[in-house]
Amino acid sequence: MSIRLHEREEERLAALHSYGILDTPREADFDDVVKILADVCDAPFSTVTLIDRDRQWHKAAFGIGDLRETPRDVSFCAQTILHDEDLLVVPDVTQDARFADNPFVTGEPGLRFYAGAILRGDDGLPIGTVCVVDYKPRTLDPRQRHLLQLMAKQVMAQIALRRELADRRLAEKQQHLLIAELHHRVKNTLATVQAVIQMSLRTARDMDSFRTSIGQRIGSLAHTHTLLSERRWDAVSFTELVTGELAPYQGAGRVTLDGPDFTLSAQIAVAFGMVLHELTTNAGKYGALSSADGRLTVTWALRAEGDHHWLDLDWRESAGPKISEPEHAGFGTTLLKRIVEGQLHGKVVSSYAPGGLHVRAEARLPPEAMAPSLA
């Protein structure tokens, strides 16, 4: 048994620490146990003892004052957990090689009798003992032995219950945090949808165009949310955002993409997803992607200036139908400026060359938008 337990010592220590009971204050439930044992077993002191790596620590003790721990190498209970049975009774420790040279036996207080029942978890690993000790050689009668073992089981049940309650409280705390985060995300999403609807109403030519555009825009928003959900709302790849919007046009080799990948936080990813959707939709309806010969090149780069990271985005359409600058800013242009210039402290420059739209944007990425190549 001792050899097998030595091989599992790290596992045993991990089990002990998982209960989160070491170095906790005294508790009445455990104090009552040692008082009852001392009385029933007619012993001057008793303890509930846990065996750590280099010490034994008393969760409860009767008859030893304020002493809470001693070194493991002088611990009787450290020898007990190596025992094959769940109960070890030593009538005279001076006659047992495991205890005879212990300083608590050869010196003060001159211990002579020891009995300990092992605290064993469901995994079978011992984490400590419930014990009684006396200054004279003696033994326990069957009733006292039985009670010592019963008390060990009750103490172990209490320790396990503590861990279960702690785990439950942690789970409840995490659930509250998740609910709060969900409320926050729902609120942000509803605010975004409301803003999209209002802007779409202002720029739509008629109700039919409004219904079409709002459906597509909400669909794009849902696509970005799907990407975020798949990643547990941690972060989303910028490259995935771009390729996701342009996927219907990439098969014919009409789209060229070039730039490093990096991740965006949820809020910024939603904003960029909508911008990319508007640029793609306009290119597909009126720009280069609306004709068979049209081409689109999207490049981006990351740069660092001081403590900030910047994204430089270049959207260049070519070989498409002839275009001219519109008299009034549309939804896409308004949204692009609002997000890049208003939210991300950047700037947008758009030019309407005869062969296609050219948009240059630079945006300052917030700290949570991680750029691994610049970190």
Image (cartoon, rainbow, N blue to C red):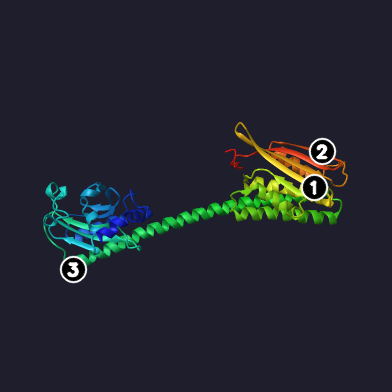
Q: Is residue 110 left or right of residue 225?
A: left
Does dot 1 land on a helix, a strand or a loop?
strand
Tell me where residue 367 sits by quadrant.
top right
The image shows residue 145 at horizontal and vertical percentages of 20, 65
Identified by mark 2, the residue type is Ser
Residue nearer the viewer, 155 or 344: 344
Q: Amino acid at mark 3?
A: Pro
Of tags 1 and 2, the one toward the viewer is 1
Residue that appears at 70% across and 46% down: 272
How much space separates mark 3 and mark 2, taking CA atoms?
A: 96 Å
Circles 1 and 2 in contact, beta carbons < 8 Å: no
- Nearer the observer: mark 1 or 3; the answer is 1
Q: Quadrant of the C terminus?
A: top right
The residue to which callout 3 is attached is: 142
Above or below for 29 versus 235: below
Q: Nearer the viewer, mark 3 or mark 2?
A: 2
Q: Quadrant of residue 78?
A: bottom left
Which residue corresponds to mark 1?
Answer: 295
Pointer 3: residues within 10 angstroms few (<14), some, or many (20+)?
A: few
Name the residue tied to disc 2: 351
Disc 1/disc 2 C-alpha distance (Å): 16 Å
Residue 195 visible (yes or no): no
Tag 2 secondary structure: strand
Asked which secondary structure carries label 3, the reply is helix
Three-letter amino acid code of the residue under disc 1: Arg
Are there few (<14), some (14-19), or many (20+) residues within 10 Å of tag 1? many
What residue appears at the point 80 percent right and 53 percent down from the top-left corner? 213
Left or right side of 364 for 143: left
Q: Is residue 296 visible?
A: yes
Q: Which of the two discs, 1 and 3, labels the residue nearer the N terminus?
A: 3
